[in-house]
Amino acid sequence: MAFRNRFAALAVILLAFTLFAISAVAATDGAAAARYVVAQCGWHVGQDASWFDSSADRFGKSTYCQTPDSVDPFEGVHLISQVKSSVDSVGGTKFASWRWQAPNGTGIVNVHGQRWQYLREGFQHRLGGVPQNGSFTPFLELDYSDGTKRDFWQGFEPYAQAFESRLVCYRTSDRNCEADGTVLAGVRSLTISIDDAVRPTAQISGGLAATDWLRGTQSLTFSNRDTGAGLRYAQTSIDGALRASTEMNCAKTMISGQWRGTKMQPCPTAATDSQTVDTRTLADGPHSLHHCAFDFAGSYGCTADRTIRVDNNPPAAPKGLTVEGGEVWQRTNSFNLEWTEPDQGPASPIVLSYFRLTGPDGYAGGPWYRTDPGKISGITLPGPGEYKARVWLADQAGNSDEAHAAEATLRLDNVPPTGYFVDPPEDDPALIRVSVADRFSGVQGGSVAWRPADGGDWHPISSDYLGDRQMLEARFPDDLPRGSWVLRAAIADGAGNLTVTDRRANGSQMIVRTPLLDETQVSASLGSSRASRGRGTVEIGYGERAHLEGRLTGVESGGLGGATLTVTETPFPGSRAKVTSRQVRTDARGYFDLWLARGPGRRVVVGFAGTRRLQGSDSGVLELRVRGRLGFKARPKRLRTGRRVYFTGRVAARGAWQPTRGNLIQIQYFEESARRWRPIALTRTNRYGRYRSSYRFRYITGLARIRLRALLVPSSRFPYSGAASKPVVIRVRG
């Protein structure tokens, strides 16, 4: 029987729990009140009731509510009011009660539990609620003994402020109830459902709630309050996702998968604490912050949504970092940097730029900062040399990372170069040399100029800078008259610093006296075994070799022996040959001779390059022309007037190309009376140099002996001169 009573009790309890869950969800969704359930005296929990004795110590109490975990949660559990064993009577209307008081702002909806009692005449076990007026209103008045733990359930409308279990002598005040220690009233296994109509309030402060840009881990301090069931949770959400949660220390227990309070007000009514949120888990930009306080009944109160701005990432490196004027050497110690700010998107704007300098001899300076967007102006370097400037950015949230730096090179050289004249070598007095040096930007070039020693304008000389030798070289002009001349050198470095000097290493002035070089002359002539020798244009026969001879002399030194001359042959257009050069040496007296190869016509120049003490010279152009050669035949040799004579032949072209359009060939006859050749026909050679033509004699009477020949007409596209064939005699009878 005890088992069946316990099973029935559990079934009623589960039903109550289900109703509580539904009511809690409804409250969360905005219902007028939320509900929670308090478990008392059973399930290994204690009790949160007050005991009252109106008889001035004639009643006693007994509590055994929180059994060990290993013991049946209902076996032996009780909450009893009883008459003391030493008392023989209790006055009328006197009572002892266990009272469960609802917290402020709440009301008891219903109560369920188990009751039993052992009574004598005049005693009652009363179960009831206390409404708003404060009067006890019983819903059960039991005046008989019943040791069976029987279930009871009672709802209250309107809500009750308290629930009581009373053991009372219900006789009038002028009568007593006889009693002994066996009179008692007990309850256990209570579930009290309470409606909480007041929502919690929530307030927040701290870094996470600030209006500034946020980064890293931020704290949020909350100060939440509740007047009913008390605060169970404080939760902070960002963009609708839970980011932090704080659970309060509440008196509760888990029964059949549902949390039940173990006190009438299970949780604290006020809670102040801090939560932390790692903003690095959020994307950069604005977010919605929401904080709510939840009471034990499931209702909640939230702060108004507020926008927070998060930025945890440092700006990217400056885009297109450049040095105003380029990364070149400059002599002014003031540098400006420019760049394009990277796109921050929804993140905080860029407010600062940092820069650091490293340079020669281990120099390291900075970092320094500037506030101008996209530029840093007026950077000064501690001294000349090459420096590296690293620039990185900081945003309004305070993010910056030197790893996101761009780098530029700053080069300062405000120290002029140095230089001095080196004495010319004895074997090359025209060679002017200036030893130069620059520590930083390096010598970029220079120039040398001269003027008369007694004053006058400066005249520049073409100069070369030999970087590998750190030397400026020029050649003194060889066409100046006899005299003394002052030299000066202007030396420039990579930064534009300029040094001008006219001094040797020993400090003396650089003076040159002329003349420096001996003038030379090349004389040359062409000839052959059959042609007379000439210095201008010489013509030789087809297939002949030309002979070149001449002499190299110096104005002061006479014939120059052992000198090397260059003979350059430039073929006429149409030649198969290319420009050739060969060398010939003079004998002890300066003479030379050379046989030229057979072939087409050409231009010949004999040149002397000169030496460090001798001026160069050349022979001028010698033109070698070669007469052409052509065959000529006439057939027949005998013919009558009115018949044709046919001419054939071929133009020789050793070492030459036949012109594309052919050579022009003129057929001539010899006029005896005028003693001269006259043309009778005109033709062209084919691509093989062959030609063909004919002529008809019309007006000859009697027997005529006629001399004929072919003439090669000169052409700019053929490297052989014009020439006539051998005459051919034919006889024409009229």
Image (spheres, rainbow, N blue to C red):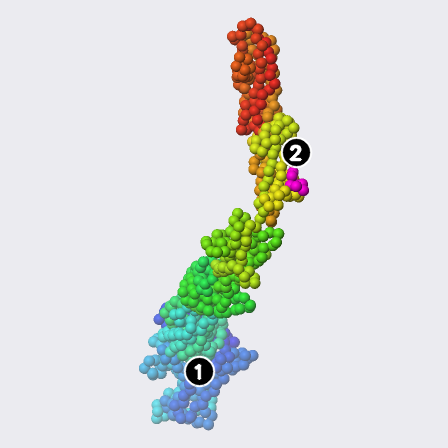
For disc 2, the marked residue is 595
Residue at the image position 52 percent from the left and 81 percent from the top: 67
Magenta part of the chain: 585-592
**Relative horizontal placement of residue 589, taking residue 32 as reference (left or right):** right
Q: Residues within 10 Å of mark 2 (few under 14, many from 20)?
A: few
For disc 1, the marked residue is 48
Residue at the image position 53 percent from the left and 18 percent from the top: 682
Foreground: 306 or 225?
306
**Relative horizontal placement of residue 563, taking residue 103 as reference (left or right):** right
Number of on-image labels: 2
Q: Position of residue 338 (x, y in %)?
A: 44, 60
Image: 263 above or below 648 = below
Residue at the image position 46 percent from the left and 65 percent from the top: 333
Judge whether residue 321 can be spotted in this image. Answer: no
**Mark sitting earlier along the chain (2/1):** 1
Judge whether residue 614 can be spotted in this image. Answer: yes
Q: Amino acid at mark 2?
A: Trp
Residue at the extreme right? 588
Q: Secondary structure at mark 2?
A: strand
